[in-house]
């Protein structure tokens, strides 16, 4: 399994191409919010940029917080989200320790699915997908449903 | 958001009220420059002065903003304090995407606030907040406070002014997101006169994309074209300062108030030199992967024990010309020092540099004394210029008050018009010859980007005024459609009419896509009509003697050709402003 990582954010120029690509190609929206990766400054444009994106936790606190099973643990880290099961409670975003989940005004959650669609759109190669070793035994409650 | 009308937020500061207005005309004026002219005709007062509270301050974006890469600029339009006529100034940064995601095609601000205010707006809020405590603060300090006061880090744009704008100086700009500017023709003064210290635009909406396969496919193609080819490498690599050395070799770089057109020591401020020793990093406008914003650093020792502070200063060809070659300052770090002061004061850097270049020569010639200049201005003395920029912004005495109203105002007052480097406004960093001088002097924005006059000078030997004027009109027409989309003009080599048609079609603007020649001609005419209605007379434009005294690679300036060009271009502008649409349709 691969996960998205942002190991070279010092190179980021703040063009938002990654967020816009994610929203455009994954979530079918024009947005820099409804995306699995969002760019913000570290305190003004003179201080550089940081990426708000899923760290691929395993176990994922957001999945543990989800009361309906809409979030389930993804093998290798991160989560799989089935929006049909989501009741828009926002518990996932509250549980995320790094504010990686965006809630739109209807409380619909947007989180990285580690597909890597954003990676080729970064002009400075800040992002990459990385292979992670999965533990066959690490199966959680939600994972049976996803299969 | 795709719609066949414009969704415009109007704010009346006198009443403290705002409303959303649906304005018709998408298929006639497209957006951006066209929309700005349309809105000025709707809300502007042609006969009243620029500082009448009723006059609007307008911001617009285009139909492709956010939908395609490099569609990343915003048009700001107003009646200019510089010449009391309709004017446009353009800026990159974040404001274009922030407005898109605030779900607005335009913002029109009229009236005058009773006390200094900051306007905060987004897709779900509008707030007018009193900020009297920020009045008097420089641009960067203001930005820091506004960032604390308003939410949305990363997805907002903060426009603000410094002391020059507060004072109503016609050479005050609007700072956009620290490193970009609505610099020219006095937008900063328009904010200042309305008591607006800052505008924070939060882009907090999202839109469903067109339900077709064409759009994502075309987006990928355009993105690849803009990033994989070497078409944009000039802007991505050294940036616009790559022009410094070639212009110097051509004897086409304004040096020391255009007393010279080259200097043997120019390497100290070349783009290559900046990149080698002073470039800290790059930034990008939102939605643009090119990242042409070059940010240099300066450090300053403030205590003996090797105690330093550092500042980050953005640079381009124009600021380098204005505060470097034009002032005889040929060290890149000293140039950044001066730009930094200009930024803090909220001056337009081109106007500020050219104004002080004139003042230096005026002092040399003895038509003014140190009583007027306060500082013993001397070409090459960066420290003196740093102090003088503050006087210029603050209007410390009568001399600086006149100079801060524009170089020609001071030149008329002190009898130094012959050597005032003014082409409609303070010149840009090209001295390529007759066509460029005419293009800037008469051009709509008095900008080197109105049309490619500088390129025509370099590529065409023939001195045919009619042909050159035709070129300027045609080139402007193409550019005005781009600035209505609203594309960065750096992408003009990629976004031709055919591609723009495809882009518009893919997102649903099919009618507009099929009418590009008609619409671009209509926008061009609407702008000129509006400009002329506010008092512009192209026949009355004069080009100061200094521009006829220079020598370029082509030799001396041909004054007869220059005069003929000016007459021909003026004639065409008058035709454009008078033409009716029916005739235009037949022509196109």
Image (cartoon, helix red, strand yellow):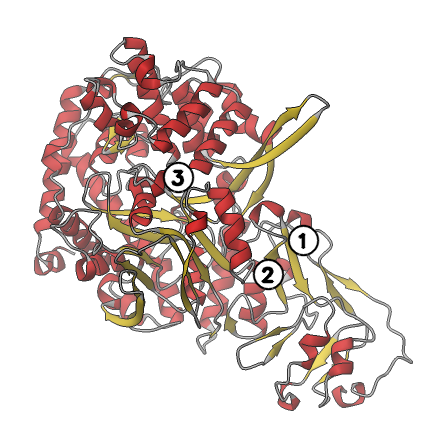
Count of marks, rendered view: 3
Q: Is residue B118 visible?
A: yes
Q: From the image, tell me which residue sits under label 1.
A: A126
Q: Is residue B324 visible?
A: no
User: Circle 1 — which element?
Assistant: loop
Could you give the CA–CA distance between mark 2 and mark 1, rounded to whole angstroms? 10 Å
Give the image location of residue B294, x and y in percent: 53, 39
Give the image location of residue B66, x and y in percent: 45, 62
Which sits in the foreground, B467 or B61?
B61
Q: Say which chain tag 2 marks.
A: A
Q: Say which chain tag 1 marks.
A: A
Q: Quadrant of the C terminus of chain B?
A: bottom left
- Which of the 4 image quadrants contains residue A5? bottom right
The reply, left or right, for residue B315 in relation to residue B497 is right
Residue sitting at 41 percent across and 39 percent down?
Answer: B346
The label nearer to you, 2 versus 3, is: 3
Which label was assigned to residue A18? Answer: 2
Which sits in the foreground, B383 or A3?
B383
Q: Say which chain tag 3 marks.
A: B
Which sits in the foreground, B440 or B497?
B440
Residue count near mark 2 (Cα–Cα under 10 Å), binned few <14, some 14–19, many ≥20: many
Give the image location of residue B318, x and y in percent: 41, 32
The reply, left or right, for residue B232 in relation to residue B300 is left
Residue count near mark 3 (Cα–Cα under 10 Å), binned few <14, some 14–19, many ≥20: many
Query: Height in image: B564 above or below B72?
Result: above
Query: Height in image: A89 above or below B455?
Result: below
Mark 2 touches mark 1? (CB < 8 Å): yes
For marks 2 and 1 on the same chain, the one whose residue lies earlier in the sequence: 2
The label nearer to you, 3 versus 1, is: 3
Give the image location of residue A38, x and y in percent: 61, 63
Query: Height in image: B30 above or below A43?
Result: below
Q: From the image, tell me which residue sits under label 3.
A: B163
């Amino acid at each position: 399994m691969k996960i998205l990582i942002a190991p070279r954010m010092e190179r980021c120029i703040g063009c938002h191409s990654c967020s816009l690509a994610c929203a455009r190609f994954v979530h079918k929206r024009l947005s820099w919010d409804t995306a699995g990766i969002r760019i913000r400054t570290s305190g003004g444009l003179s201080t550089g940029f940081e990426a708000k994106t899923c760290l691929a936790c395993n176990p994922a606190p957001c999945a543990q917080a989800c009361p309906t099973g809409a979030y389930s643990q993804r093998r290798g880290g991160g989560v799989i989200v089935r929006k049909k099961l989501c009741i828009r409670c926002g518990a996932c975003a509250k549980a995320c320790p790094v504010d990686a989940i965006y809630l739109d005004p209807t409380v619909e959650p947007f989180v990285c699915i580690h597909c890597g669609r954003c990676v080729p759109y970064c002009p400075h190669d800040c992002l990459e997908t990385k292979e992670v070793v999965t533990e066959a035994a690490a199966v959680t409650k939600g994972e049976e449903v996803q299969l | 958001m795709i719609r066949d009308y414009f969704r415009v937020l109007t704010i009346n500061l006198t009443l403290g009220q705002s409303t959303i207005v649906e304005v018709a005309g998408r298929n006639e004026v497209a957006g951006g420059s066209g929309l700005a002219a349309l809105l000025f005709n709707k809300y502007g007062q042609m006969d009243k002065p620029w500082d009448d509270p009723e006059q609007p301050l307008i911001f617009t974006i285009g139909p492709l903003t956010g939908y395609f890469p490099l569609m990343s600029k915003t048009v700001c339009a107003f009646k200019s304090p510089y010449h009391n006529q309709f004017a446009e100034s353009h800026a990159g940064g974040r404001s274009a995407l922030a407005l898109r995601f605030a779900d607005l095609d335009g913002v029109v601000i009229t009236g005058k606030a009773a006390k200094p205010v900051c306007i905060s707006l987004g897709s779900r809020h509008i707030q007018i907040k009193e900020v009297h405590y920020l009045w008097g603060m420089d641009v960067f300090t203001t930005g820091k406070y506004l960032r604390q006061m308003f939410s949305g880090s990363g997805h907002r744009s903060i426009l603000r002014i410094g002391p020059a704008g507060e004072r109503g100086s016609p050479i005050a700009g609007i700072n956009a997101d620290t490193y970009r500017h609505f610099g020219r023709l006095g937008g900063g003064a328009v904010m200042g006169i309305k008591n607006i210290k800052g505008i924070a635009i939060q882009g907090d909406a999202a839109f469903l994309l067109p339900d077709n396969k064409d759009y994502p496919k075309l987006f990928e193609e355009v993105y690849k074209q803009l990033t994989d080819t070497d078409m944009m490498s000039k802007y991505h690599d050294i940036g616009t300062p790559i022009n410094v050395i070639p212009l110097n070799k051509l004897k086409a770089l304004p040096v020391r108030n255009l007393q010279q057109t080259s200097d043997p020591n120019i390497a100290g401020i070349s783009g290559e030199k900046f990149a080698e020793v002073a470039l800290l990093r790059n930034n990008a406008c939102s939605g643009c992967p090119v990242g042409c914003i070059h940010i240099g650093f300066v450090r300053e020792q403030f205590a003996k024990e090797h105690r330093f502070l550092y500042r980050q200063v953005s640079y381009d060809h124009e600021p380098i010309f204005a505060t470097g070659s034009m002032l005889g300052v040929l060290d890149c770090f000293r140039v950044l020092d001066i730009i930094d002061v200009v930024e803090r004061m909220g001056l337009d850097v081109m106007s500020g540099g050219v104004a002080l270049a004139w003042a230096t020569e005026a002092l040399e010639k003895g038509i003014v004394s140190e009583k007027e200049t306060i500082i013993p201005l001397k070409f090459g003395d960066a420290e003196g210029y740093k102090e003088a920029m503050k006087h210029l912004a603050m209007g410390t005495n009568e001399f600086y008050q006149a100079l801060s109203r524009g170089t020609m105002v001071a030149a008329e007052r002190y009898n130094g018009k012959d050597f005032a480097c003014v082409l409609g406004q303070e010149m840009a960093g090209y001295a390529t010859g007759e066509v460029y001088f005419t293009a800037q002097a008469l051009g709509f924005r008095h900008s080197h980007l109105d049309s490619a006059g500088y390129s025509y000078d370099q590529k065409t030997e023939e001195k045919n005024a009619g042909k050159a004027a035709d070129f300027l009109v045609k080139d402007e027409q193409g550019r005005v459609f781009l600035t209505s989309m609203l594309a960065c003009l750096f992408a003009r080599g990629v976004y031709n009419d055919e591609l723009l048609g495809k882009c518009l079609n893919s997102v649903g603007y099919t009618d507009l896509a099929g009418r590009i020649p008609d619409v671009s001609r209509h926008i061009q005419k609407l702008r000129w009509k509006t400009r002329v209605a506010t008092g512009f007379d192209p026949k009355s434009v004069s080009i100061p003697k200094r521009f006829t005294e220079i020598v370029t690679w082509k030799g001396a300036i041909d004054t007869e050709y220059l005069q003929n060009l000016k007459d021909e271009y003026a004639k065409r502008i008058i035709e454009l402003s008078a033409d009716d649409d029916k005739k235009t349709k037949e022509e196109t």
